[in-house]
Image (cartoon, rainbow, N blue to C red):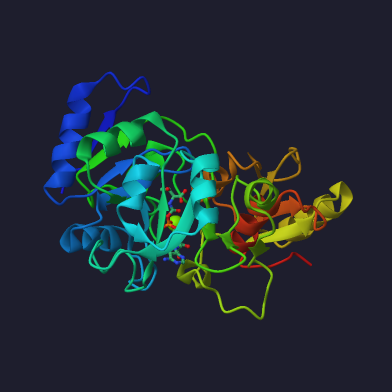
Amino acid sequence: MKTEMIVVDKCVDEENSYTQAVETLKSGEVVAFPTETVYGLGADATNFEAVSKIFEAKGRPADNPLIVHVDSKESALNYVQEVSPKALQCMDAFWPGALTLIMQAKPETFASNVTANLQTVGIRVPNHPVALKLLHEVKLPLAAPSANTSGKPSPTLANHVRHDMDGRIPLILDGGATEIGIESTVLDTTCEPPVILRPGKITKEQIESVIGTIRSSSGNKDNVPKSPGMKYMHYAPTAPLYLIEDEKSLIEKAIQYVQEKGKRVAVISEMDYPLADFNFPLSMESLYASLRECDFTDADLILAPVKSSDQDQDALMNRLEKAADHKWFS
Ligand code: TXA
Ligand code: MG
């Protein structure tokens, strides 16, 4: 299959590109599109065959459900039932935006592979002009996981999507770099109090300021993960990534130790280490691009300095820990 990439203007005045994307989606094919978090791999969420093409293109395990994207709260309410007052408050406060709400799905609404046969569904209204325009014109709910090969970092540029999906999907809408750079916060609103299943740009504190106390499932080891995606490998670069305490002399020692063994080191960090063979920036916006850049080097090992005490970096730490598979350099 040939993969076409079309640059779409964020001012959304290019009618023709949308017509092509809408027709492709309606014919049951997959289209990658930008959101404010990361690029999504979209298909008609009511069409089993179309959704199965997402799983195939990503190599995604079938028991990991997909997030459904809609253009408004009103659209979302067509697909869910027994919606809690807190979920409604979250919609009003955070949509469009980087918050996915897990709710009870109306039976027979979505293709069964969207929800991995669960009775719940994750829905969000993305805050990106291209995604909103596409959803508005296609008039369908779009199932859209991040547009990466399963296990790899999510794409924050259309080129990342092309790298992973070339020859696997017919169309990529290129809307430039995504603003936030990590995936949406996932909040389960089917329990009381609601639980954050995946931290993101929208923080626990921001949500609590709207609906009161909630729980956060990360770090709670007794809890069986309710978000099926959490048990899989994530965001992994090819070379092993190690977290290391953010202390200059310690990091320099680590770099030298590895280099003395004849190996090359990449560092993903807020500051550059001239000793390292490669340096890439560390922030929420740049993390995934940096992880992907490491794959284009011959680094044997990657170090990511983090402050183990840093609590306000919840979402970034969560992604780094997964990318490192919780390994610390010692
Ligand atoms: O920012 C985002 O959320 C991006 C963009 C494209 O919107 N999408 C995204 O989708 O990150 P995906 O499929 O890569 O991640 C979906 C996460 C997974 O961890 C999945 O297990 C969880 O949401 N999830 C989906 N439906 C769920 C459900 N019914 N119950 C619990 N967790 C669910
Ligand atoms: Mg993903």
Q: Which image quadrant for residue 93?
A: top right
* Direction from residue 57 to residue 243 in the image, left or right: right
Pick the quarter of the image with the C terminus: bottom right
- Is the residue 77 above or below the residue 223 in the image? above
Q: Which image quadrant for residue 223?
A: bottom right
Name the spot of residue 325 as percent of width and height, x first: 61, 67
- Is the residue 311 above or below the residue 63 in the image? above
Q: Which image quadrant for residue 74?
A: top left
**Residue at left 66%, top 67%?**
326
- Is the residue 116 above or below the residue 187 in the image? below
- Which residue is the extreme one toward the right? 249
Name the spot of residue 73 as percent of width and height, x first: 39, 44
Confirm whether residue 144 shows in the render. Answer: no
**Residue at left 32%, top 45%?**
75
* Direction from residue 24 to residue 62 in the image, left or right: right
* Quarter of the render that holds ligand 2: bottom left
For the image, the number of numbered tags is: 0
Confirm whether residue 124 shows in the render. Answer: yes
**Residue at left 30%, top 31%?**
133
Q: 228 and 295: which one is in front?
A: 228
Q: 277 and 146: which one is in front?
A: 146
Name the spot of residue 172 as percent of width and height, x first: 28, 39
- Which residue is the extreme one toward the left? 27
